[in-house]
Amino acid sequence: MIPTPEQKTQCYILCCWFTKLYLPINIVRMDERTKNLFFLAGEENIIEIY
């Protein structure tokens, strides 16, 4: 599965933002059922990109 251009852009922005805060990016994964991107940074920052 390939993420949409909007999802790719949002993922890039989040990666830049979290690395500026010195937080590790642990998981970036696409949910096969909903086609949403799951983004886990640091220990408690969970973001889902629709």
Image: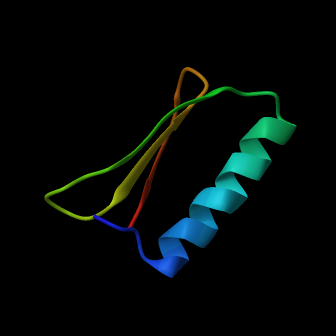
**How many labels were placed on the picture?**
0
State which quadrant residue 49 falls in.
bottom left
In percent of width and height, residue 7 lies at: 49, 70
In percent of width and height, residue 31 lies at: 25, 52
Residue found farthest to the front: 1
State which quadrant residue 29 falls in.
top left
Q: At 55% from the left edge and 67% from the top edge, which residue is drawn?
A: 8
In percent of width and height, residue 34 lies at: 19, 63
* Left or right, residue 2 beside residue 25: left
In percent of width and height, residue 28 lies at: 46, 43
* Left or right, residue 2 beside residue 9: left
Q: At 66% from the left edge and 59% from the top edge, which residue is drawn?
A: 12
Q: At 66% from the left edge and 53% from the top edge, which residue is drawn?
A: 14
* Left or right, residue 12 beside residue 39: right
State which quadrant residue 20 falls in.
top right
Quadrant occupied by the C terminus: bottom left
